């Protein structure tokens, strides 16, 4: 490596800098003129409030894992119960979508019936004639208890509930009603299976909260407001601002400001989560210490006029604390409690703290793992990598070598919606007319860059 390249490892990016600047409307292109100050580094000052809060959060998330067996629908068994119940009893659930599946499930379960079985002789009630018919014999494996033993074993203690007159096991910690004689009461006519249906709702709700929170960061704070890689209508901006508050990762204005600084001064002292300071610092450590003075200095010099002119961004900034309390904690907890009788403890620790902790760490992995592990097919002179596990957990943000090479591309990847749920969301919003003007990089520009600065690991598609 030449002396010039040692002094400026991003030098190879500069021939394409003009093209990037033409497509980037914000300050997110690496600034090769920045030089770190000589001399000793400033002392590291701990932020004890953040250390305590992060410790409590992750302790609460761990407790949420303990509560998973009692959270509705978080076991494979309960999902199977829902599916089997829908097939055995078409009125098992009252939702139209599951009613549509009930006939096909019934046909599948009918394969469990073996006919003919034993022949029975009955006298016709009116004519007196003897009528013979073969009674169908059901496969023993299709009986509820043998099926349960086959799937989960007979040695495990489990509560049982009645579904359409059949006894089925459940691993939920919520006790089922028992009569004074010790038997399980029969379901009322119609057999809506309220208990079993609710066992899928909390899992679904936690997943919805995770997805909405993630979109608030990826499609909102990141691709829309940090990079202006597409344009969003007012209703979509409101939704993304609400989702961003649910994610609780600083308000949009501060998130976008720090992210632009990260791109402009990547892997230097002016980078808020400089990965050269190690995995822990890039992942969470940067939130537990005071910012480096250069981060603050460079952040103040950025042009943030586009953010200040956005009424949605500034409204969220003014009311951020209240929106976080309501959207990040109260809403995930109260919805399952109010609508299907989930306990407040499960609602708080599972869709609340556990979901919040998971979305935080998924975002942090973009700053840490995606800057350390993976290949660099587009630019080998920079640290960011292509990390498919991060792309999966952060719904599309793991194609990081591409993103730092072409920060203005709305998809953050050349592969469209592949492992990129955020791109699919933006495309769908464009289809609905709620978003427009998506920026992207031409295939020729990508191939030219790959041949010039890639590490040789490039694979199309």
Image (cartoon, rainbow, N blue to C red):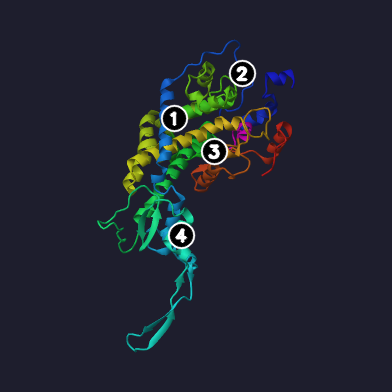
Q: Secondary structure at mark 4?
A: helix
**Looking at the image, which residue is at 37% across and 41% down?**
346
Of 21 and 210, nearer the camera is 210
Q: Position of residue 125 (x, y in %)?
A: 32, 85
Lower position in the chain sequence, tag 3 or tag 4:
4
Q: CA distance from mark 1 to mark 3?
A: 20 Å
Lower position in the chain sequence, tag 4 or tag 1:
4
Magenta-highlighted residues:
400-410
Q: CA distance from mark 2 to mark 4?
A: 67 Å
Q: CA distance from mark 3 to mark 4?
A: 52 Å
Of 23 and 117, nearer the camera is 117
Quarter location, residue 238: top left
Mark 3 = which residue?
230
- The question of residue 16 being in magenta is answered with no
Q: Secondary structure at mark 3?
A: loop
Q: CA distance from mark 2 to mark 3?
A: 29 Å
Mark 2 = which residue?
34
Q: Is residue 36 left or right of residue 330?
A: right
């Amino acid at each position: 490596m030449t002396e010039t390249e040692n002094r400026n490892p991003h030098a190879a990016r500069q021939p394409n800098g003009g093209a990037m600047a033409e497509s980037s409307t914000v300050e997110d292109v690496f600034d090769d003129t920045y030089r770190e100050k000589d001399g000793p580094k400033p002392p590291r000052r701990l932020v004890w409030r953040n250390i305590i809060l992060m410790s409590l959060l992750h302790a609460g998330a761990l407790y949420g894992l303990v509560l998973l067996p009692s959270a509705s629908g978080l076991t494979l068994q309960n999902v199977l119960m829902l599916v089997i119940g829908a097939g055995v009893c078409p009125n098992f659930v009252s939702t139209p979508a599951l009613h549509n599946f009930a006939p096909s499930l019934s046909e599948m379960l009918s394969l469990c019936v073996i006919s003919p079985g034993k022949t029975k002789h009955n006298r016709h009630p009116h004519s007196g004639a003897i009528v013979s018919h073969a009674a169908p014999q059901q496969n023993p494996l299709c009986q509820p208890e043998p099926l349960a033993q086959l799937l989960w074993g007979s040695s495990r203690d489990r509560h049982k509930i009645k579904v359409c007159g059949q006894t089925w096991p459940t691993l939920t910690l919520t006790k089922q009603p028992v009569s004074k004689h010790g038997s399980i009461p029969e379901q009322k006519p119609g057999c809506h299976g309220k208990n079993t249906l609710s066992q899928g709702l909390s899992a679904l709700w936690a997943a919805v909260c995770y997805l909405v929170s993630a979109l608030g960061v990826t499609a909102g704070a990141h691709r829309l407001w940090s990079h202006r890689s597409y344009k969003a209508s007012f209703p979509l901006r409101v939704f993304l601002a609400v989702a961003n508050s649910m994610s609780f990762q600083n308000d949009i204005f501060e998130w976008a400001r720090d992210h632009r600084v990260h791109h402009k001064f990547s892997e230097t002292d002016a980078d808020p989560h400089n990965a050269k300071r190690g995995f822990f610092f890039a992942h969470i450590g940067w939130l537990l210490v005071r910012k480096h003075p250069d981060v603050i200095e460079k952040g103040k010099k950025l042009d943030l006029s586009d953010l200040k002119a956005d009424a949605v961004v500034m409204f969220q900034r003014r009311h951020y604390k209240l929106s976080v309390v309501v959207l990040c904690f109260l809403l995930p907890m109260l919805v399952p409690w109010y609508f299907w009788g989930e306990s407040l403890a499960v609602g708080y620790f599972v869709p609340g703290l556990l979901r919040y902790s998971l979305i935080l760490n998924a975002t942090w992995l973009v700053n840490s793992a995606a800057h350390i592990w993976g290949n660099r097919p587009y630019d080998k002179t920079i640290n960011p990598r292509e990390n498919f596990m991060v792309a999966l957990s952060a719904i599309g943000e793991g194609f990081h070598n591409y993103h730092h090479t072409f920060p203005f591309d709305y998809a953050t990847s050349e592969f469209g919606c592949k492992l990129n749920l955020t791109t699919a969301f933006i495309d769908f919003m464009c289809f609905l007319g709620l978003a427009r003007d998506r920026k992207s990089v031409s295939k020729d520009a990508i191939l030219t860059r790959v041949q010039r600065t890639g590490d040789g690991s490039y694979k199309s598609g």
